[in-house]
Image: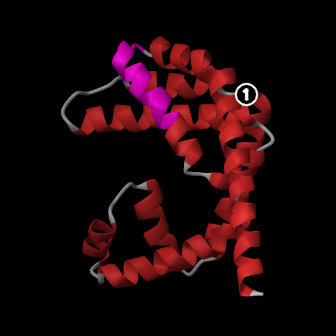
Amino acid sequence: MASLAAQTIQNRNSLFAVARDAFLAGVHASFDSILKGFFAHHGLKREQVEDLTQEVYLRLARRPECVGIENTKAFVFTIARNLLRDRFRRKKTHGQEMDIEAEDQIAVETADPLQTLEFSQQLDKAMNVIGTLKPAAQRVFLLHRIGGLSHAEVASELGVSVSLIEKHMISAIAALRPLRLSC
C-alpha cells in the first residue's frame, strides 16, 4: 500500500512538472520579445536585458502555484517591474542616484486600470488587517516591509530582540496570509 501511495505521488509530481514546463514554454513564447523590449525601453544594456529577462523566468519557475494563473501577462510584468525597481534601489544604495521619477514612470507606463483597481482593493484589505494587529506587530511590520529595515535594524530601533521582531513578523504575515492572491 505504501508503494502505491509513493507511486501516486510520483505520478502527480511528474504531471505537475510537465504542466510547469508547458506553462513556462508558453510564457517564453508569448512574452520573451515583449519583456526584452520592456527592459530595453528603460535604458538597460543588452546583457542586462538578457539577465533580467532570465530572472523573470527563474522567478516564475520558483512559483509552482502560478502554473494556472488567470492573468499571466499581469503577473509576468509585475515581476519585471519589481526587478527594475530592485535594480534602481541597488544602484541608489551603491552611490549611483537614479531619478525617482524614472522609477515611478515604470509603474505608470505599465499599469493596467483593472490591475490598478484590484491592487488598490487588495491594499485596502491588507491595511484593514494590519490595523487589527497589536500595535507592536503593526510597527514592526511597517518598519520592516514598508520602511525597508532589516530585522536587526528594527530590533535596534525598538530596543528589543531580533527574536521578538521575528515573532511579530510571523504573526503579521499569518494575519495577512488569507488575503494572498492565488499568484
Residue 149, x across and y down, in percent: 34, 59
The answer to whether residue 115 is left or right of residue 142 is right
Residue 59 relative to residue 97: left or right = right
Q: Which residues are magenta?
A: 43-56
Above-or-below relation of 42 to 141: above
As displayed, is residue 21 above or below residue 6? above
What is the three-letter code of the residue carrying label 1?
A: Asp
Secondary structure beneath dot 1 equals loop
Q: Disc 1 marks which residue? A: 112
Which secondary structure is most common in the magenta stretch? helix
Assess whether residue 50 is covered by the magenta stretch: yes
Closer to the camera, 96 or 11?
11
Visible residue check, residue 120:
no
Furthest residue in direction bottom, as rendered: 1
Quadrant containing the N terminus is: bottom right
Q: Is residue 131 magenta?
A: no
